Structures are given as C-alpha cells and as structure tokens.
Image (cartoon, rainbow, N blue to C red):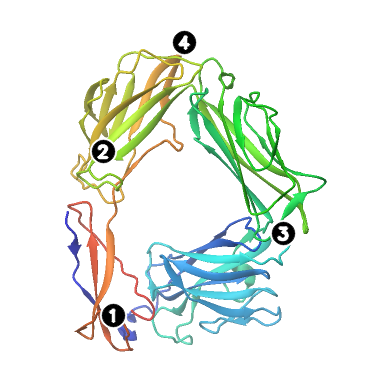
Amino acid sequence: MSARTLTPTRMGLLAGLVLAGFDAAAATPGCTLDADATPLVDSPFTATVRMANTDATAGFGPTVDVLLPPGVSIDGATALTIGLVVLDGGVSDGVDPLAHPVSGEPIAVPVGYRLAAVRLPFASQAGGSPATTVQLALRAAPSVTPGTPLSLYASCSYQLGLDALDDAVSDPPIRSDDPTVQADEETTVVTPSIASLRHTVDPTDEPTGPTFPVSYRIRVEVAAGETIAGVAGDLTVRDVLPPGFVATSVTTGGTVQSPASFPSTAGEELAVTFPDLTGITIIEVEGYFDDLTFASDGTPVALSATATLEDAEHTSGPVAASASVDHTAHAVELEESITNVTNPGSAPVPGDELEVCVVAKVSDAFTATSAPAALTSFLPDGLGFVTSGDAGFLSATAVAGGTEILFDVAADLGPGASETHCLTAIVDQTFVDTSPVLPGQVFDPQHTLVTTVNGNALVVAEADGDQDARVTVAEPTLTKTITAIDGTPVAGPFEVKPGEVVTYRLTGSFTAGDITGVTITDFLPQPLH
C-alpha cells in the first residue's frame, strides 16, 4: 500500500482553546519507578519512571519529580527519544520543604536529597492514553560507599492542573502523592558496587555431544578508575559448571587453576585467578555436554551454572559478585529460522513471502527413530502456505486456526545428525474471517516431531529459547513537518511567538492495507495546545 498523507492540522498557540467543561473532573497521574539495582560507582545507570493518566480527563503540564540521595546525580532525561529539560529544585536542609521548580509548591524532601523536576515533552496527557516512559540518566559518585543501599523517590504531577493556564490558585497542580508527606512517593533502592559480574550461555538450548558446542561467558566489570585485588594473594573467578559439561578450552587473561587439562572431566568447575582487575575482563569457556547428562529416555534436562567473584577486595572493603545462567540439554531438539525472501533483512509486510525452516538435531549419544509424517509444522491464521520443494514434504491441510504441514524425516536419525525441512509461506492481507492483518501483528509458527529414543516416545517441540523465531509485521511510520506559520510557508529555522498559528503535516506510511478505524494521537510540545 502506498504512503497516505493525512490532512494538515492547524493548531493555535492561544491558551484558552481547551478549557471548557473540566471543573468537576480530575486527571489522575499514575507513577511507577524502577532502577538498575547494583550500578557501578562513578558509572552511568538508568532509572525509569512511567507516568500514566488513569482518569478520563486530560492533565496539563505533565512533570516527573525525582528525589536523589547524596552522592547520586542526574545527567539528563529522555522520553520518546527526546532529550528533556531537568530543572534543579535544590538540596534539602532537612528543616524546610523545597519549592517545586515549576509551581513553587512546597515539597517534603529528606535531608541531603536533591529535588529534580523533568517536564514531559508535550503540553498535556490525555486520559487513558498509553503510559509515557521517562529514562533518567543517573550516576553514583566515587564518594558513595559501595554496598550501601540508597533510596530513590519519584512522583508524577500535572503542574498546570486541568487547563493550560498557569494559575495555581484556582487550578492547583494534581499529584500522584501528597507533597507534604515524603513517604508517600514511589521508591526503589539501588546499591552501588565496585564490581559487577554477568554470566551468559550460547545457545540456551542444544543437544549433547561434541557435535553441538556450547559456550559460557563471564564478564567482570570494575568501576571506572578503580582496582580490585586479592585479599591474600590472587582473587578468583569461579564457575560451578553444570554436571555433564566438558570444557574443551578457556580463553582468559588470567591463570586457569581448574580444569587442570582439556578436555576436562565432565562437571569439573572452572577457577581462574588474577592478581588484580581493572576495567572489563572476559572469560570464555568452550565445551559440550556429554551423554551422562541424560537418563536413558532422552528427556530434556534443565541445567544451571553459577559464576562468582571470590577473595577480592577494594580499598573500601571486600568485593563479591555472582550470577547464574540456565541451559537446557536435549536428546532431540528443533531449531527454527524464518527469512524474508521478498525483502531480505526487512520486517515483512502483507504480500511478502517467507522461508520457514526447521532443523531436527539429535544428540551424539542417541538415535531418533521416527514413523512416516513424524514432523508437523503449523502456520497460524494470517500466514498462508505457498509451496515446499522439500524432499520430505507430504501435505498441507487447512485446519482450525491455520495450516498444518506434514514432513517425513529419516527413519533413524543420529547420533549427531541434523535434518532440515523448509516451506514457503506468505503474509496474508486478511485472516480467514476477512479481518485485516494489522501492523505489529506477531505470528509464531510451531513445529513438533514425534519420535522414539531408546524405546521411549518423545514429542519434541521447538525450544522457546534463543532459537525460537517469530514473524512481526512491519509497523507504520509517522513523520511530522511544519509547513507554515500564520499561513506563510516556512522551511526553518522555526521561531514562533504567542498567538501565532502553526500549520503542520503528519504523514503516515501504512504497511498493511484495508485498515479501518485508525486513530493517530499527536502529543504537542509545551507550550503548544
């Protein structure tokens, strides 16, 4: 479908256009606060405030207030990818409340805390509209004591009340909290640290055996400008690897104390020592899971590995960190991939053809014995079957909710073997009931293999980990351009005065056709309304 240009909208800058009828109503600002739980000292971290209007009435001058403890500063804020202005309300002496930097209203603030106000990038927040996410860029100063919990507080308000006029007497600010009661605000706790540890595994689902390698990765980061050392000698990074894991190599800048040799004994832990650490240190462990991971019936096994930083200290005191990661070992696994054939590398739109492939992989320790038509692929309604040139393709049948495709697989597959089956699907314009396929629609093809391992019947579905693939229909794009000021075409820069009328154009490019009931909400920046 071609891009559709919407009729230009004219908006006035005069304040009284949206005042009528709100005297008996009240906007209700909802507010939530989250933050990185263990940020590094003297490093940026993020706090997230979500502000929503839970009433039907619009609120004007949406603002987020945040109270920052001593040692935590704010570097900036963004919402909807737009940089926001942060207004400083000062630091509390613990005796008198601070004056809000927008309205001047008294705000109860703990002693030593700083009040910062962030104004959202639009003049009002409509009732029932989606919550606006505000990202606060914060930093813990080098002076904070590592390991000491620090409380952050946030509240949300409509500083101009129910209209666009700045008249706090007849139309006072509407808040999510009681500004005179500091404990009434949203709160979260952060605990600055000197070092952090992250633990990952790739892939998260895999058959066992040397044919199917697995990689564990440990990332230790020390705060900028800081050093950690061993308490009495070297410090240690230890990884308690899952039972059955055989390490074949370790890549590290430290000294590997365990395993003593490679390949390691199954389930042997990893221990790497360092005299000290600064910056970022990476440890890569390559290996595989052996056949001892399983019982003889081939049932998948959930496994966990835990990495720890041990025997480490900083001038501020002891340093410790840990993290765990999960992996599922399989006797038989299905791995799916989806490729846009019509527009490679792009999100699909209705009419695009997709190649949907599924790989059946069998552990080095097992053989999967399957009857004919053992592999079933299911395309949900909205994805249509086109064809399959696959040698194992048997049939495609319309069923309730979609299309069922059957494939033959090898009667005996394995050990360590893989077999791939593919089909071509199309993103339909409509569902079976003729309702349109919408932008952003998500489709999840499913695959199931019925097989037998060591006489035990297994029904293998595709893993829900990092090898699961989904189809998301491309979403529309919107662009906004200013075309005139007081009827005179302009190309920018744009300078306006109170009372001038700005004409702008919204252009929407819709990837799916035959869409009805489209509503576009435009949030105007302050002081426009």
**Quadrant occupied by the C terminus:** bottom left
Measure the C-alpha gap from mark 3 to mark 2: 52 Å
What kind of residue is marked 2? Leu
Q: Earlier in the sequence, mark 1 or mark 4?
A: 4
The residue mark sitting in front, 1 or 3, is: 1
* Whether residue 245 is visible: yes
Measure the C-alpha gap from mark 1 to mark 2: 43 Å
Q: From this viewpoint, which residue is outermost toward the right?
A: 232
Q: Which mark is residue 455?
A: 4
Q: Earlier in the sequence, mark 3 or mark 2?
A: 3
Q: Position of residue 375 (x, y in %)?
A: 33, 22
The residue mark sitting in front, 4 or 2, is: 2
What kind of residue is marked 1? Gly
Residue at figure coordinates x 64%, y 58% from the top left: 40
Q: Position of residue 14 (x, y in %)?
A: 31, 86
Mark 1 residue crowding within 10 angstroms, few (<14) / some (14–19) / many (20+): few
Regarding mark 3 in the picture, which secondary structure is present there? loop
Mark 1 touching mark 4, by CB under 8 A?
A: no
- Quarter of the view holding residue 332: top left
Find disc 2 in the rendering and name its residue.
Answer: 354
Find disc 3 in the rendering and name its residue.
Answer: 146
Q: Position of residue 171 (x, y in %)?
A: 45, 83
Find disc 1 in the rendering and name its residue.
Answer: 492
**Quadrant occupied by the N terminus:** bottom left
Residue at figure coordinates x 67%, y 61% from the top left: 225
Residue at figure coordinates x 57%, y 79% from the top left: 88
